[in-house]
Amino acid sequence: MAKFDRKRLKAGVKESTEYSNRTRDSKGSSSRQPIDIEALEKAGYTKFIPDGKKTNYISVIPYFPGDNDPRQGNVKEAKRQSTYFLDFWTHKITTNGDIYVCPNATFKRKCPICEYREENRGKLDKEAWSEVKPIRRALYAILDETDSSSFVKFWYTPYNMVEREIQEIVEDERTGEITYFADDEDGSTIKFKFEDKGGGNWKFSGFSFEERKFEITDEMLEFVQDNPLDKFLVPTDYDELARVFDPYGSAQIEEELEEENEEREEKKPKRQPVRKNKDVCPIEGGEFGKDFNEYDECIECDVFEKCAEKYDELIEEEKEEEEEEEEEEEEVIVEKEKPKRIPKKEKNVRSSKIKIITDEEEEEEEEEEEEEVEQQRRKPALRRRTK
């Protein structure tokens, strides 16, 4: 029996307990999200869920964005300005509930859903139009002031429900003074109420600022800096989004085409090993010279040049054969067009010149000769009668 590894057992129990604790509020949704929640939790963040029974108090933690940030990802790191939330846009696929980052609104790249929306501007009804509109979202790193045992939490929210409401109170209507609530030292605590009406219908209200009573520590700042929020954004590939959106059923067509291509690849002639010093096509079923450049593999074939030369030879031979056939046909035509020669007959002894006699003239002559003989035969008889 193998030795029992108690240390390994303890480590497994610890990891299993921590994972269960991290995911205790999970709803079990299998839909795709635009942020990698699992990666956020593995990095050390915990998910913030607003309390629906009492007032919520949070402080937003600022950070310098990383390379995946939509606004500053292309800026040199030393020149990037700090921010306090990840601002991005998404599309929700109504057929399965999956949510994807909108490439166009977020990164100024091509997006098949936005293209469809523009192509059908004015043609879609209100409901269909809202389904293809990108939705703005926000991701924060926060300090939950009502949970003293927690470290840094992440808060993923619709922009209009939270950030827009915060911006409504940022500027003092009387003095015009701006409250920089996300400042790490002189910022403010955000106070608000939350109500979950069920079915994903939430309500945020009562936003206001209060003096911050909890410190944002250097440890928190360093943690968020090492794990910038844009690191957990899941960018969307154009082709991937086109397949899942598919308003015209093109994904099914594309899938069928892919299957046809796979079948074609399977049926594709296999290459045979090239025999040195022999004019052999390395493709199974291919004929050297005759099938030149007929296959996709021809361009990289080891005998491409020789095959091309053989192909040219075959073409020349074919031309020569065609020319010979044409010449033979012309000779036959000339023979057919030549006048028929009249066969020569016997010479007419009564003429000093040689006369060519036709068949009709010959018959007439024969008849005349027969009459002459008949007359000669009759003459003695007539003489006998006169006596």
Image (tube, rainbow, N blue to C red):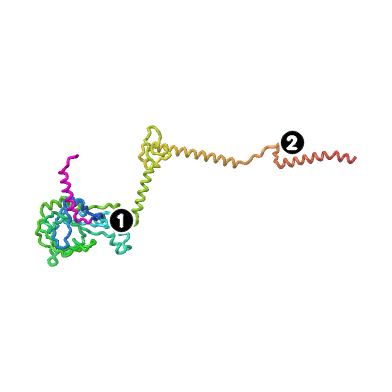
Secondary structure at numbered mark 1: helix
Residue 130 placement, left or right of 297:
left
**Quadrant of res 94:** bottom left
Residue 132 colored magenta? Answer: no
- Observer-side mark, 2 or 1, equals 1
At which x and y percent is residue 90?
Answer: 25, 57
Q: Compare residues 32 and 20 and report the one nearer the observer.
A: 20
Whether 278 is drawn above or below 147: the answer is above
Residue at the (74%, 36%) spot, across then down: 349
Residue 329 visible, this orientation: yes
Chief secondary structure of the magenta portion = helix
The C terminus appears in which quarter of the rendering?
Answer: top right
Residue of label 2: 349
Residue type of the residue flagged with mark 1 = Phe
Classify the position of the N terminus by image quarter.
Answer: top left
**How far across and how far down the image is residue 382, in percent?**
86, 41
Q: Nearer the viewer, residue 92 or 160?
A: 92
Q: Position of residue 17 (x, y in %)?
A: 17, 50
Residue hosting label 1: 245
At mark 2, the secondary structure is loop
Q: Residues within 10 Å of mark 2 (few under 14, many from 20)?
A: few
Q: Let me know if residue 3 is in the magenta part.
A: yes
* Start-end of magenta stretch: 1-27
**Residue 119's image quarter?**
bottom left
Tell me the kind of residue under disc 2.
Answer: Val
Residue pictured at 45% horizontal, 38% vertical: 316
- Decide if residue 291 is on the left or right side of residue 151: right
